[in-house]
Image (spheres, helix red, strand yellow):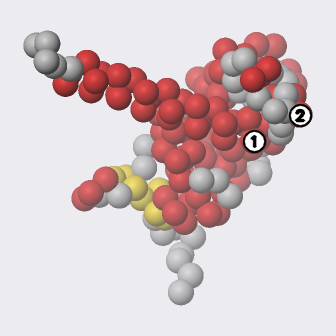
Amino acid sequence: MDKSPDAFRTISEVAEDLDLPQHVLRFWETRFAPIKPLKRGGGRRYYRPDDIDLLKGIRHLLYGEGYTIRGVQRILKAEGVRFVQAIGRGEQSVAPQQADPSEAPDDDLGEEALEEPSRSHGSPASLSLPALQVLQVALSELLECDRVLSSLRTAIEPTSNE
């Protein structure tokens, strides 16, 4: 049974449609304030058609045009949500004169780049931008896990000598 084009979609449906892991969509919610899916009981997300157009636009800017997260944030601020939604629908594109040089597609990911590439088996330059961004998300999640674990260790450390 196919849904109407106006129907709300679950995160799994949107992730499949955009060919992205669900955790990337949840991560983008933390980086792009305009992404606000409707949340029902248990935190289940439902995306409206406009939300999906926005996600498609963000995906195109990040993966298709090579913008950084910060660059897309600047485009959203300067041009607005409707502009990025139009990009997602294929009705609009980012013209070179619209882009600020600080937003320009870049081979390195700026402050969000993976650190210490010499420790890896391949250099970041040999990875595609989508692969680097997936690794960025994983790194962010691992750093957050480390922060939580460190705070828990501090909270449960014994106060007396055993």
Tell me what residue is drawn at x 27 percent, y 57 percent.
42
Quarter of image, res 151? top left
Mark drawn on residue 120: none
Residue 135 at x, y percent in the picture:
66, 37
Tell me what residue is drawn at x 35 percent, y 28 percent.
148
User: In the shown orientation, is residue 86 left or right of residue 108?
Assistant: left
Discs 2/1, front: 2
Circle 1 crowding by C-alpha within 10 Å: few under 14, some 14–19, many from 20: some
Quarter of image, res 18? bottom right
Tell me what residue is drawn at x 62 percent, y 63 percent.
16
Amino acid type shown at disc 1: Pro
Residue in the foreground of this view, choosing between 134 and 64? 134
Mark drawn on residue 126: 2
Total numbered circles: 2
Vertical side of 24 occupied by 109: above or below:
above
Circle 2 crowding by C-alpha within 10 Å: few under 14, some 14–19, many from 20: few
Q: Mark 1 sits on what residue? A: 130
Tell me what residue is drawn at x 43 percent, y 27 percent.
146
Q: Is residue 65 in view from this perspective?
A: no
Outermost residue to the bottom? 1
As measured in the structure, the alpha-carbon distance from the residue carrying label 2 to the one carrying label 1 is 12 Å
Residue 72 at x, y percent in the picture:
66, 29
Vertical side of 18 occupied by 69: above or below:
above
What SS does tag 1 mark?
helix
Residue 143 at x, y percent in the picture:
49, 27
Residue in the foreground of this view, choosing between 7 and 20? 20
Vertical side of 158 occupied by 31: above or below:
below
Amino acid type shown at disc 2: Ser
Residue in the foreground of this view, choosing between 33 and 110? 110
What SS does tag 2 mark?
helix
Q: Quadrant of the C terminus?
A: top left
